[in-house]
Amino acid sequence: MTPPDSSPEPGRIQSGEGALARRLLIVGPPGAGKGTQAVRIAELLGIPAISTGDIFRANVSQETELGVLAKSYMDKGEYVPDTVTNDMVRDRLGQEDAQAGFLLDGYPRTLPQVEALDGMLSELGIALDRVLLLEVQTEEVVARLVERGREQGRSDDTEETIRRRIEVYSEQTAPLIDVFDQRGILRRVDGMASIDEVTAALREALVLG
Ligand code: AMP
């Protein structure tokens, strides 16, 4: 196995200040703008943005077995069981395009998922190098999500489901922030700024060292 960072990789960007992180998570409450920013940052680095929500939604629309199962949780604003989600991510991280880096969006969301991810990465001989936290105000987030539900017709973007998703995030996912903070890889970014300003702040937060 090639040790991480041993040779230049496609899409590697060196900034004046040093190398940029490329094994990344983006975290934040529902509606913080994770998906939008993940796509931008991933493109900048030439790495895949891997959204577990998007993978579940693709399975729902293709009516796969996984999709039928996932939908029963998603429509209530609850999390899909960890074992199902972990297996799906293990499979995705094993694919060729994720070997030079990845940006996980919406995973891990629970402490058991953090443990599972740590195990997957250590098997691959790599570790996370940044966790990007988008900080937003809850009421603003609810308004954004109600709007998105109207525009995109997402069945889990009704006000009742949105409130439940925020509750589930606070109970199960917010505690992960401390875990990553203690590892020294967490960077907080103000998610209330404009889309371009948030991207610029995230870009800054990628600088290693
Ligand atoms: P998202 O698009 O990231 O907001 O995810 C939409 C929905 O997919 C969530 O409300 C969950 O029902 C499900 N989901 C996405 N990622 C995960 C995860 N890591 N663990 C459990 N459920 C997830």
Image (tube, helix red, strand yellow):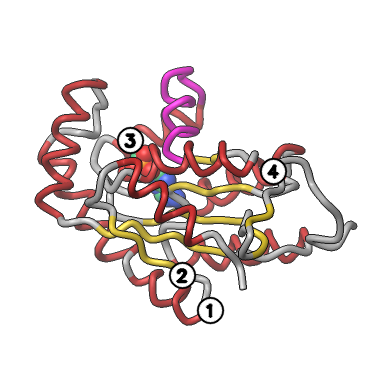
Q: Assign a secondary structure to mark 4.
A: helix
Provide the residue designation for mark 4: 98
Q: Earlier in the sequence, mark 4 or mark 2?
A: 4
Image coords of residue 24 (percent x, y): 56, 56
Image coords of residue 196 (percent x, y): 35, 41
Q: Which residues are magenta?
A: 52-64
Q: Earlier in the sequence, mark 4 or mark 1?
A: 4
Residue type (three-letter) at the residue carrying disc 1: Arg
Task: State if disc 2 and disc 1 touch (CB < 8 Å).
Answer: yes
Q: Using residue 21 as the reference point, say whether residue 175 is left or right of it.
A: left
Q: Using residue 197 as the reference point, say whether residue 59 is left or right of it.
A: right
Q: Is residue 64 visible?
A: yes
Q: Quadrant of the N terminus?
A: bottom right
Provide the residue designation for mark 3: 72
**Which residue corresponds to the image point at 43% horizontal and 67% vertical from the top-left?**
187
User: How many C-alpha atoms fall within 10 Å of the one at disc 1: few (<14), some, or many (≥20)?
Assistant: few
Residue type (three-letter) at the residue carrying disc 2: Leu
User: How many C-alpha atoms fall within 10 Å of the one at disc 4: few (<14), some, or many (≥20)?
Assistant: some
Q: Nearer the viewer, residue 8 or 14?
A: 14
Q: Nearer the viewer, mark 3 or mark 2?
A: 2
Label 3, label 2: how many angstroms apart (C-alpha)?
Answer: 32 Å
Provide the residue designation for mark 2: 186
Q: What is the number of the mark on residue 183?
A: 1
**Which residue corresponds to the image point at 82% horizontal and 51% vertical from the top-left?**
8
Image coords of residue 108 (percent x, y): 48, 57
Residue type (three-letter) at the residue carrying disc 4: Ala
**86 above or below 159?**
below
Q: Earlier in the sequence, mark 3 or mark 1?
A: 3
Label 4, label 1: how many angstroms apart (C-alpha)?
Answer: 23 Å
User: How many C-alpha atoms fall within 10 Å of the one at disc 3: few (<14), some, or many (≥20)?
Assistant: some
Residue type (three-letter) at the residue carrying disc 3: Ser
Image coords of residue 83 (percent x, y): 53, 52
